[in-house]
Amino acid sequence: MGEKPQLMKWDLVEDRYNQIGDKDSDTYIKPMVTSEFSKTMCGGINVLKNIKVPWDLTCDEIIYVLEGTFRLVCDGESYICNRGDVLYIPKDNHISYEADDRCVIFYAAYPHNWKQLAGITKVPGIDPDDFVAG
């Protein structure tokens, strides 16, 4: 038998979700599935509001839009994603995560230890207490 499922509740992000609603511009990432639970993939919730976050993507990523409008810019092309849309982004792309108003996305990434493999020690929006390198 395999390992047991793990349930993560919205309560883990609700306070920060509400705080971002009061700010002009912000982002908050809550890693939920980490190497503590999985040896293959990771994932979590990202709340963005009126922000552009340029990033060199070192993992494959899938984004599912839960609320609002999310925009990903890659090589000058914008991918506009609304509630219910799913976006696949292959690794090794220079991208920008963008939102004009508040939006909430779920992300899943492979491999789970992409930060460790890339030597990344800080990700904009992840609180230091929530940062998991591997």
Image: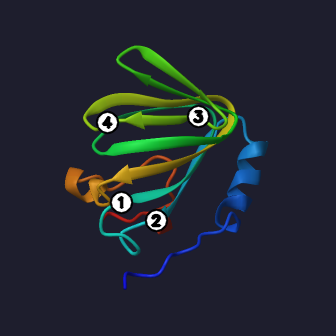
Image check: 111 left or right of 106? Answer: left
- Kindly state the secondary structure of the residue where label 4 is placed: loop
Residue pointed to by mark 3: 85
First in residue order: circle 2 vs circle 3: 2
- Kindly state the secondary structure of the residue where label 2 is placed: strand
Image check: 127 left or right of 91? Answer: right
* 72, above or below 59, in the image: above
* 73, above or below 25, in the image: above
Q: Position of residue 21 (x, y in %)?
A: 76, 44
Q: Residue at point 25% right, 59% down?
A: 116
Amino acid under disc 3 = Asp
Amino acid under disc 4 = Pro
Residue 81, labelled with which disc? none
Q: Position of residue 14 (x, y in %)?
A: 72, 60
Residue pointed to by mark 1: 41
Residues at marks 4 and 3 touching, judged by CB atoms closer than 8 Å: no
- Kindly state the secondary structure of the residue where label 3 is placed: loop
Residue pointed to by mark 2: 33
Separation of marks 2 and 4 at Cα, in angstroms: 20 Å
Residue pointed to by mark 4: 90
Q: Quadrant of residue 60?
A: top left
First in residue order: circle 1 vs circle 2: 2
Q: Residue at point 42% right, 63% down?
A: 131
Separation of marks 1 and 2 at Cα, in angstroms: 8 Å
Q: Nearer the viewer, mark 2 or mark 3?
A: 3
Separation of marks 4 and 3 at Cα, in angstroms: 17 Å
- Kindly state the secondary structure of the residue where label 1 is placed: loop
Residues at marks 1 and 2 touching, judged by CB atoms closer than 8 Å: yes
